[in-house]
Each structure stands twice: as structure tokens, then as C-alpha cells.
Image: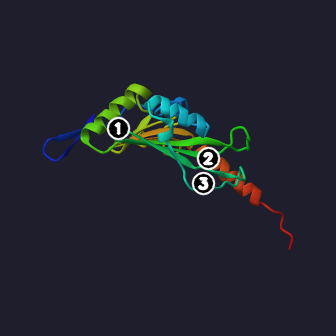
Amino acid sequence: MNLRVVFGISALLVVNVCTAAPRAVDAEQFDVAGVKLGMTPEAAASALAGKLDIDKRSIIFDKFPQQNSVTNSKEPKYFTAKKSGASITVYFEPNVPYNPKSKMAVSMIIYKQPWTPDNVAAMKQMAIEKYGQPSNGTVGMSYQWCLQPHSNPGFGCSEFRGPKLELSGTKLQLEDFRYRQAVIDHMNKSSNSKPAF
């Protein structure tokens, strides 16, 4: 089924509504501009520079890193890069349990282009060519790829907390919330204490 939405006089955006049964996809195997979940910041920067054919020095790391509660050192939380009007931001979380050889890991990658009807159509076409048919979608809003899509078509991967890819207009986001959850659990555990009253 196709839902047609007209923007202005001449622009037409066709949004396909998922009507097929949900399909399990391992988004952990995906990359966005060469960057994969779990990579170190250094490996991610090298992969991005190679994929986009940009100078590695043009990748801008977090200029104000904060003290990291897991690594006990100041670590950048993200880096950004731009190419041909598009931007990519790569976010990191500390590895839990702590690994001195690999302190931080990629937990989320966001690729954006300026919004135009042509860019929306091109992003959708490229995403389907690269990642295959979506697992499910949020009707009229986004397409999502994950291992455990909601059983109802049109509800996306709403209850799944693992690796998930989502395309919404001209924004493509690959994320694994488990990295953040591991840090939250670590912080809660380290704050536990035995009452003594």
C-alpha cells in the first residue's frame, strides 16, 4: 500500500507503509559510512575517513571531554564529520566491564542530509539497497531494522533494546542501547552500599 503526501505544488513523497510480516535482521552487522557498533573511536574515525574519502584531520572529536566514571579518565563522547552537505556524528560509551585496551566503543551513529523530497527518496532507496527490506516500520514515520520487531506491522522495533537501525526522512540512526544500559548498571552497582543504621 502506498500513502502519498504532497509537499507544495510539484514535490511528491511516496512513503511505503509496511504491510508484510515483521522480518528479523541483525543490525549489529550493519555499518553507516563504514562505522560499526562496538568499534573503538580510533577505528571508527579511520573507517569513516576511508569510506567518505575525507582527511582524517577533518573529523572533529568532542572538544570538552568529561571525566568518565568507568575509565576514570577524560574521554570524548563523540566525533563529527561532514561531506557534501551531509553530516555524521558518532557517539561512544565506555566498555563495561572496563577494558584498558579498548576503553570506549561506538554506541550510536547518526547520518543526516538536508531535508528535500529528493533526499528523502534517495536515502530510502539507498537504505533498502544496502540493508535489505526493513524489519518493520512506524506507519508514515520511519523504517526500522532489528532482530525483534514488534509483532504488529507498523509498530517498528518499539520494545527491542538491542542493535537497531532507523531511517526517518533524511536521518539514519544506528544504535545499541545496551552500551548505555551497561554503564547505567555499572553506576548503580558501584553506588550500592550496605545500610548501617
Q: Quadrant of the N terminus?
A: top left
Where is residue 153 shown, x and y percent of the image? 41, 38
Q: Is residue 193 above or below residue 170?
A: below
Mark nearer the N terminus (3 vs 2): 3
Q: Secondary structure at mark 1?
A: loop
Where is residue 110 shown, x and y percent of the image? 46, 43
Pointer 2 and pointer 1: residues touching (CB < 8 Å)? Answer: no
On screen, residue 79 versus residue 1, left or right, reads right
Q: Which residue is mark 3?
A: 65
On screen, residue 193 versus residue 106, left or right, reads right
Q: CA distance from mark 2 to mark 1?
A: 28 Å
Q: Amino acid at mark 1?
A: Ser
The circle on residue 93 is 2
Q: Which residue is mark 1?
A: 84
On screen, residue 5 versus residue 17, left or right, reads left
Q: Residues within 10 Å of mark 3 (few under 14, many from 20)?
A: few
Q: Amino acid at mark 3?
A: Pro
The circle on residue 120 is none
Where is residue 10 shown, x and y percent of the image? 14, 41
Q: Residues within 10 Å of mark 1 (few under 14, many from 20)?
A: few
Q: CA distance from mark 3 to mark 2?
A: 12 Å
Mark nearer the N terminus (1 vs 3): 3
Q: Is residue 24 visible?
A: no
The extreme right residue here reads 196
Which of discs 3 and 2 lies nearer the camera? The answer is: 3
Q: Quadrant of the C terminus?
A: bottom right
Mark nearer the N terminus (2 vs 1): 1
Q: Secondary structure at mark 3?
A: loop
